Image (cartoon, rainbow, N blue to C red):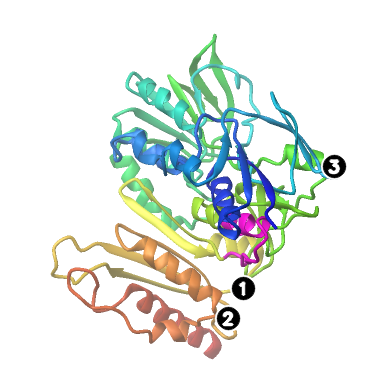
Amino acid sequence: MPHKTLVVGGGAAGIGAAGGVKAADPANEVVVYTEFEDVGYSPCGIPYVHGREIDTFDSLFLAEKAAYVQAGIDIHYQTRVEAIDLQRKVLTVAGEGEVAWDRLVVATGFVYADPGVPGGGLGGLYYVKNIREAMEWDKVLDKTRTAVVVNASPLGLEMTTALAHRGIETHLVHPGPWALADVVDPDIIAPVQDSWAELGVHMHFNTTLESFAGERTLSAVRTSSGTIPADLAVICTHKEPNVTLATAAGLKAGSTGGLIVDERMATSAPDVFAAGDCAELPHGLTGVGVAGLTGSHAYAQGKVAGFNAGGGTKHYQPVYVPWGTPAGKWVIGGASFGETLATALGLPYVLGKAEGISRARYYPGTKKILVKLLAEPDQLRLIGAQMVGQEGIKERADFLATAVKFGLTLNDLASMENVYSPAIGALNEPIVLAAQNGVENATAARAG
């Protein structure tokens, strides 16, 4: 029997959910509420438009608005949901009153953590998220002489690179000893930071933000290391699950602040599902909750949530977190844990490390790749990986996350087959070299 499903949020998870509802039963009614002017675009692409790698913001849209109408998805733009009543199964919607639902999908995304310093209300503080605002900020960048990026988060890495590409004097302020210091190993990020220096980026590590200064608009950023005159500050603080509406209604949140969901993306309330940055998923190795993953995670979660809300049955599995991003002149990436995070979590490991090349040594354009593999000491099962190079990082990260998921060992990887073709692959695959090094290190440790 067809259902009426309401979706709160029009990002990757929300649009994925709407499509999932229709996939379960085309007769289902689905309504999406979004506070923004658009849905179904890629905010992850915004830094690359700012950096001029992508020509236009129009390229970031998945589809035109008419396509959603044709698909039978009713989207209410610039419409705010004010409250959720779980018992009565109604939403309170600004300008519409109470709207009843059979099933509900919460896909409210994330908010940036408040920097928590004076001057947060000044003009000239840019939070990268809404594409229409990004279009206006892009015009501001044409006139910006000096910009400060606050925090070397994944977005911070992208925006630092983008601003440098625009020829803007760029300062990166970060409290940690290196960029992404809570998850990325120092030897992986070092080439990135060297390339930022070549691009003229000023890096301020072990430096805390103290305030934003100015009359009505920003004129300087004050830090523990001094004052930086600036026309613009890009706020790249940690992403926090946007769950105020959901928790006020009584939905349960986990240790990350994200909504607790099961393998069906079902929440603690009957007929209510959640997906994307507002949801918490278990890590496949530790069972520890994680949130704020990538757009591909959000979209896949939304499809599962929507399909189940629409009357079907699908499961979303624990995550092993393949990741990657360009930064400076390099690409970094990995899967699950690196040394920094494994050490912080108290996970014992054996390390395998090797530097290889992306193509045959004699082929033009060959690039170096540094690969690090972590394995548990007893059976040498892979628990994580990190890499830095200039090509082939994404594909290796995807593969290594799958290797972690299915329990492959360093011995498996040390003897795996690999493609050899001069233009696309070297004789010795860097993953194999790193695995062989890890096996040698494990053997030496046992002998010692």
Which comes before the other along the chain, label 3 or label 2?
3
| Stretch in magenta | 301-319
Residue 431 in view (yes/no):
yes
Q: Nearer the viewer, mark 3 or mark 2?
A: 3
Residue pointed to by mark 2: 377
Residue pointed to by mark 1: 348
Q: Quadrant of residue 229?
A: top left
**416 is higher (above) or lower (below) than 355:** below
Nearest the viewer among 78 and 323 is 78
Query: Relative to residue 261, is residue 365 drawn left or right?
Result: left
Who's the residue at 80% across and 38% down the image? 248
Q: Amino acid at mark 2?
A: Pro
Which secondary structure, mark 1?
loop
Who's the residue at 54% across and 46% down the image? 15
Who's the residue at 24% across and 72% down the image? 425
Question: Where residue 59 sits: x, y (%)?
Answer: 34, 40
Which comes before the other along the chain, label 3 or label 1?
3
Query: Relative to residue 139, is residue 253 drawn left or right?
Result: right
Q: Quadrant of residue 361?
A: bottom left
Instruction: Give the CA distance from mark 1 to mark 2.
Output: 7 Å
Nearest the viewer among 233 and 339 is 233
Instruction: Give the CA distance from mark 3 to mark 1.
Output: 49 Å
| Mark 2 crowd level (few <14, some 14–19, many ≥20, 10 Å Cα) | some
Instruction: Give the CA distance from mark 3 to mark 2.
Output: 53 Å
**40 is higher (above) or lower (below) than 446:** above
User: Label for residue 88?
Assistant: 3
Who's the residue at 38% across and 87% down the image? 415
| Mark 3 crowd level (few <14, some 14–19, many ≥20, 10 Å Cα) | few
Question: Where residue 174 sits: x, y (%)?
Answer: 52, 39
Check contact, mark 1 vs mark 2: CB within 8 A: yes
Question: Where residue 19 sits: x, y (%)?
Answer: 54, 52
